[in-house]
Amino acid sequence: MKRRLIPLTMMLSAGLVTAVITFIRGASILYKLSSLLIVFLIFYAIGSVIVMFLDHFDKVNSKEEMVEDEVIEKDADGEMIGSVDQSADEEGS
């Protein structure tokens, strides 16, 4: 499921439960509508926070994967191979 649909799905499912409960209890129409509006706002906010956390975790995980991909390898003599800039070593000597 796409992440942008998470808040909407949460909001609509909570609204359905609220509508059924208020219908069974025989509440007035004003009470039904006000409780439905409050539930919509609360669960949309909760869903948005969940999506924000998931996006943040993906961002952190992608940074960790990039760091793991930059492994510095050493040859048999102990010299580094790979991500070391060779031109900087030659200029310093």
Image: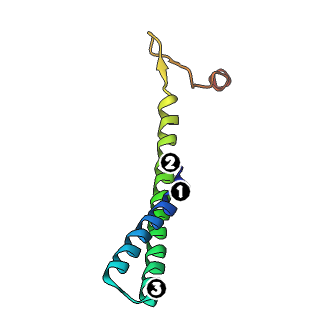
x 37%, y 70%: residue: 17
Q: Identity of the amino acid at label 1?
A: Leu
Residues under numbered marks 1 and 2 in contact, where contact means CB atoms less than 8 Å apart: yes
Q: Which residue is mark 1?
A: 5
x 62%, y 25%: residue: 85
Q: Identity of the amino acid at label 2?
A: Met
Residue 90 position in % (x across, y down): 66, 20
Q: CA distance from mark 1 to mark 2?
A: 7 Å
Based on the displayed image, in which of its 4 quarters is residue 29 positioned? bottom left
Compared with residue 84, is residue 57 higher up or lower down, i.e. above or below?
Answer: below
x 45%, y 80%: residue: 38
Q: Which residue is mark 3?
A: 34
How crowded pointer 3 is (Cα within 10 Å; few <14, some 14-19, many 20+) is rated as: few
Residue 56 position in % (x across, y down): 49, 53
Q: Nearer the viewer, mark 3 or mark 1?
A: 3
Q: Which residue is mark 2?
A: 1
Q: For numbered disc 3, what is the local secondary structure?
A: helix
Number of numbered tags placed on the structure image: 3
Query: Which corner quadrant holds the C terminus?
Result: top right
How crowded pointer 1 is (Cα within 10 Å; few <14, some 14-19, many 20+) is rated as: few
